[in-house]
Image: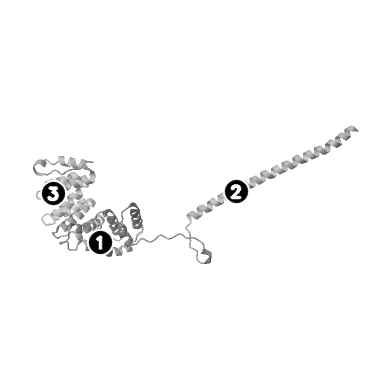
């Protein structure tokens, strides 16, 4: 009787304990399941958000018209480079201006250069000195995009009567002639050699011949021979020796040493050009080749490194 009573008392306690354990396990399963679902949701949301952001970065913004696009921000389009702005940048010094000029020349079109001749004013020409690199960059780009119109401009500039021009006034023409020779050496020799006897025209011939020699030494040598007995020989020979000294200094020196009328000037010019291109070391080597320096040649002062 007592055993039955004990069993009757214990059984409800056991059932209650089992029910609590079962409820705990069910609750833990639910918690674990929910935690897994939440983690998967967070991970999926992050992946979708990352893909969306990448898609927005790679896709250009489109302008939306109408009321729907009233509050939509659109990127401001970059201003198309203009030739007046490019000419202005030629005279502006600084890294920022150089970067802007470089970027503008990369995207400029051939038709944009049609205004350049009108902008080649006296004020512009007077600011060439000290800005040669920028001016060369603009002219080289023009010859690259539209060589026909650029040659018309070069011929007009270089063939103007320079009898009364000072050397500084002639300097911009020399720069134009150099750029033309860099683009088309043969055409430049045929169209831009100046037959006037003024100092300015002499410098122009020397400048373009120097560039022709750097581009095509054989062509330059042929044209120097053409002017053997003319009044142009001195100017084209100086340009030839100057250009050759940047390619083969020793050969240029031999040509200078073989001259009689303009020997000392050519030697000094050759050594100075070689030193500017390759350093004082090559100049000292060239001086060693001159066997009559004490008697006839004034040794130029070569600055140290």
Within-10-Å neighbours for mark 2: few <14, some 14–19, many 20+: few
Secondary structure of the residue carrying numbered label 2: helix
Within-10-Å neighbours for mark 1: few <14, some 14–19, many 20+: few
Image quarter of the C terminus = top left
Q: Which quadrant would residue 129 be assigned to in this image?
A: bottom left
Q: Earlier in the sequence, mark 3 or mark 1?
A: 1
Quick one: which residue is furthest to the right in this view?
Answer: 1
Identify which residue, 134 or 113, lies in the foreground. 134
| Residue at 61% over, 47% down | 40
Q: From what the image shows, is residue 15 above or below residue 64? A: above
Image quarter of the N terminus = top right
Q: CA distance from mark 3 to mark 1?
A: 33 Å
Identify which residue, 304 or 276, lies in the foreground. 304
Within-10-Å neighbours for mark 3: few <14, some 14–19, many 20+: some
Identify which residue, 225 or 70, lies in the foreground. 70
Between label 2 and label 1, give the one nearer the viewer: 1
Between label 3 and label 1, give the one nearer the viewer: 1
- Percent coordinates x, y for residue 242 in the rendering: 19, 50
Query: Does residue 157 show up?
Result: yes
Q: Which residue is mark 3?
A: 265
Q: Earlier in the sequence, mark 2 or mark 1?
A: 2
Q: CA distance from mark 2 to mark 1?
A: 67 Å
- Percent coordinates x, y for residue 45 in the rendering: 58, 50
- Percent coordinates x, y for residue 111 in the rendering: 32, 64
| Residue at 72% over, 41% down | 25
């Amino acid at each position: 009787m007592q055993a039955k009573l004990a069993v009757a008392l214990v059984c409800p306690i056991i059932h209650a304990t089992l029910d609590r354990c079962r409820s705990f396990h069910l609750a833990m399963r639910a918690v674990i399941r929910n935690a897994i679902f939440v983690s998967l949701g967070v991970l999926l949301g992050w992946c979708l958000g990352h893909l969306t952001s990448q898609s927005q970065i790679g896709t250009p913004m489109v302008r939306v018209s109408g009321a729907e696009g009233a509050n939509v921000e659109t990127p401001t389009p970059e201003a198309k480079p203009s030739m007046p702005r490019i000419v202005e940048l030629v005279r502006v010094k600084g890294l920022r201006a150089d970067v802007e000029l470089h970027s503008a020349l990369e995207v400029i079109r051939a038709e944009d250069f049609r205004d350049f001749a009108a902008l080649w004013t006296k004020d512009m020409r007077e600011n060439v000195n000290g800005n040669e690199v920028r001016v060369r960059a603009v002219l080289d780009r023009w010859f690259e995009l539209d060589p026909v119109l650029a040659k018309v401009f070069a011929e007009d500039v270089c063939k103007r009567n320079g009898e009364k021009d000072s050397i500084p006034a002639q300097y911009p023409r020399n720069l134009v002639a150099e750029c033309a020779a860099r683009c088309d050496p043969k055409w430049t020799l045929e169209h831009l050699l100046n037959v006037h006897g003024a100092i300015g025209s002499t410098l122009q011939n020397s400048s373009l011949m120097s560039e022709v020699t750097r581009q095509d030494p054989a062509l330059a040598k042929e044209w120097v021979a053409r002017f053997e007995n003319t009044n142009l020989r001195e100017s084209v020979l100086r340009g030839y020796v100057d250009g050759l000294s940047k390619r083969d200094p020793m050969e240029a020196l031999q040509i200078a040493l073989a001259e009689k009328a303009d020997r000392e000037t050519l030697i000094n010019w050759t050594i100075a050009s070689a030193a500017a291109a390759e350093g004082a070391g090559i100049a000292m080597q060239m001086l060693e080749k001159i066997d009559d320096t004490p008697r006839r040649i004034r040794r130029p002062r070569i600055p140290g490194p």
